[in-house]
Image (cartoon, grey):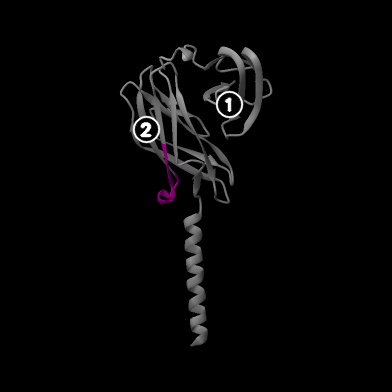
């Protein structure tokens, strides 16, 4: 009888262990649960930047679904995962290798109008809907300040896009500027600084084709990001 109870107990422990492992298979985590970004009517787009992680021990395919969006009628938005950027799309799939990570972004396009927009995206392993996570993004466009000191707003433009060899960047005023380039997996590819200038040139000759994020860190601490593709 004692032997029977030992076998029964072992079977129960094995059952619990298998159940726990099943619940953890293919889970996904994110760097942030909630993100906010603020811009001005002259901004073509404002972006919330996140990073998602494959915490399983093998390659996993995930599906993201826009579960809610509340934006002004004059606005639009797009979702960018490790594969591409999608406008007017409610759901897509992407794959991450075991232990890998990738960028996940929400792009708000305000169309020159002030207001606030929110988007909630749910990401889950395909076939395991209950093991997903929700990501909240909020974008706000505020009126340009009427303060005389802000008559020249800190920003930058870049061309060409898509880029082949060299990317030219033009800042709205002279000063000390720092640009960082990230790939779609969120890894920094390069960083370049200039001083007392309003122009910068960056070589893309040795970079692979694909999508990149250009991050600008201004002297006042403000961070502006834009996307570019390499062909």
Would residue 15 be seen by someone viewing this image from the given angle? yes
- Residue at left 39%, top 31%? 89
Element type at marker 2?
strand
Most foreground residue, 50 or 210? 50
Q: Position of residue 21 (x, y in %)?
A: 51, 59
Would residue 203 be seen by someone viewing this image from the given angle? no
The CA span between labels 2 and 1 is: 28 Å
Q: Which residue position holds label 2?
A: 118
Check whether the beta carbons of the residues at disc 2 and disc 1 lie within 8 A of each other. no
Q: Residues within 10 Å of mark 1 (few under 14, many from 20)?
A: some
On residue 157, which mark appears?
A: none
Q: Residues within 10 Å of mark 2 (few under 14, many from 20)?
A: some
Most foreground residue, 122 or 218? 218
Most foreground residue, 38 or 191? 38
Question: Quarter-wise, where is residue 196 in the image?
Answer: top right
Q: Position of residue 223 (x, y in %)?
A: 53, 26
Question: Quarter-wise, where is residue 140 in the image?
Answer: top left
* Magenta segment: 124-136
- Residue lying farthest to the left in this orientation: 73
Q: Earlier in the sequence, mark 2 or mark 1?
A: 2
Look at the picture and state if 155 lies above or below 186.
Answer: above
- Residue lying farthest to the right in this orientation: 206
Q: Quadrant of the C terminus?
A: top right
- Residue at left 42%, top 34%? 137
Q: Which residue position holds label 1?
A: 210
Which of the two marks, 2 or 1, is nearer to us in this view? 2
Q: Position of residue 3 (x, y in %)?
A: 52, 84
Q: Is residue 132 magenta?
A: yes
Q: Is residue 166 magenta?
A: no
Q: Is residue 136 left or right of residue 60?
A: left
């Amino acid at each position: 009888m004692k032997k029977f109870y030992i076998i029964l107990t072992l079977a129960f422990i094995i059952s619990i262990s298998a159940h726990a492992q099943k619940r953890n298979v293919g889970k996904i985590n994110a760097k942030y649960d909630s993100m906010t970004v603020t811009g001005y009517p002259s901004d073509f787009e404002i972006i919330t930047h996140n990073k998602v992680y494959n915490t399983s021990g093998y390659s996993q395919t995930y599906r993201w679904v826009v579960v809610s969006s509340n934006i002004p009628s004059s606005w639009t938005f797009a979702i960018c995962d490790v594969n591409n950027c999608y406008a007017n799309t409610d759901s897509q799939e992407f794959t991450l290798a075991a232990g890998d990570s990738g960028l996940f972004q929400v792009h708000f396009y305000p169309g020159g109008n002030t207001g606030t927009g929110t988007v909630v995206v749910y990401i889950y392993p395909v076939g395991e809907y209950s093991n997903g996570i929700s990501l909240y993004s909020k974008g706000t466009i505020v009126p340009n300040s009427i303060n005389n000191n802000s008559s020249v707003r800190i920003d930058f433009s870049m061309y060409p896009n898509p880029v082949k060899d060299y990317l030219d960047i033009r800042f709205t005023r002279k000063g000390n500027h720092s640009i960082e380039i990230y790939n779609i997996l969120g890894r920094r590819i390069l960083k370049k600084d200039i001083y007392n200038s309003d122009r910068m040139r960056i070589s893309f000759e040795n970079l692979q084709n694909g999508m990149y994020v250009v991050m600008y860190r201004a002297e006042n601490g403000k961070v502006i990001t834009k996307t570019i593709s390499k062909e």
